Amino acid sequence: MGKLMFLPVSIGSGLLAGFIGRKAFQLIWGVIDDEEAPKAEHRDISLAKLGAALAIEGAMFALIRGLVDHGSRHAFARATGSWPGDERPEPE
């Protein structure tokens, strides 16, 4: 039941993480280059620059999404007394 109650919190925190991740990537890319970050649909870009932009963007989104998700789970557990997920990783 706790996982079902956590669903709206998860959706909201995912949207928040996406917004924060986008802004963080724009700030970081602004330090790297004066132009906007290249996208796959741009025709005249170097593959190295595109690859760097995609790698940085992906790393930023994964980092921020993981931190926001973990934080929202802790807040949910404090509020309800129930952890919405597994307590530990599965052993190999």
Image (cartoon, helix red, strand yellow):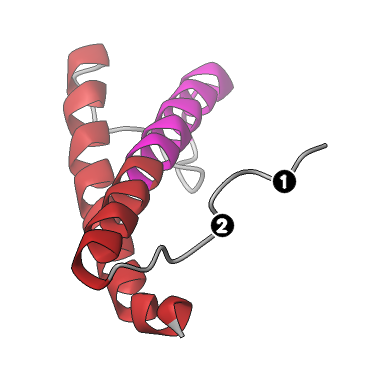
Q: Residue at x 19, y 68 (%)?
A: 79
In the rendered image, the quadrant that contains the C terminus is top right
Q: Position of residue 14 (x, y in %)?
A: 33, 61
Mark 2, Cα crowd under 10 Å, few <14 / some 14-19 / many 20+, is few
Name the foreground residue: 72 vs 21. Answer: 72
Q: Position of residue 43 (x, y in %)?
A: 49, 39
Residue 35 occupies which quadrant of the picture?
Answer: top left
Q: Residue at x 44, y 66 (%)?
A: 84
Name the foreground residue: 5 vs 65. Answer: 5
- 23 vs 64, left or right, is left
Determine which of the numbered discs, if any, sits on residue 70 in the image.
none
Q: Is residue 50 magenta?
A: yes
How many labels, in total? 2
- 91 vs 64, left or right, is right
Q: Position of residue 33 (x, y in %)?
A: 25, 16
Residue ranking furthest to the front: 81
Query: For the magenta stretch, what is the residue range?
Result: 44-65
The reply to whether callout 1 and callout 2 are in contact (CB within 8 Å) is yes
Name the foreground residue: 82 vs 85. Answer: 82
The rendered magenta stretch, by its main secondary structure, is classed as helix
Q: Is residue 45 magenta?
A: yes
Residue underneath mark 1: 90
Residue underneath mark 2: 86
Q: Is residue 62 above or below residue 16?
A: above
Please state which amino acid type lies under the numbered disc 1.
Glu
Secondary structure beneath disc 1? loop
Q: Residue at x 54, y 25 (%)?
A: 51
Secondary structure beneath disc 2? loop
Mark 1, Cα crowd under 10 Å, few <14 / some 14-19 / many 20+, is few
Residue ranking furthest to the right: 92
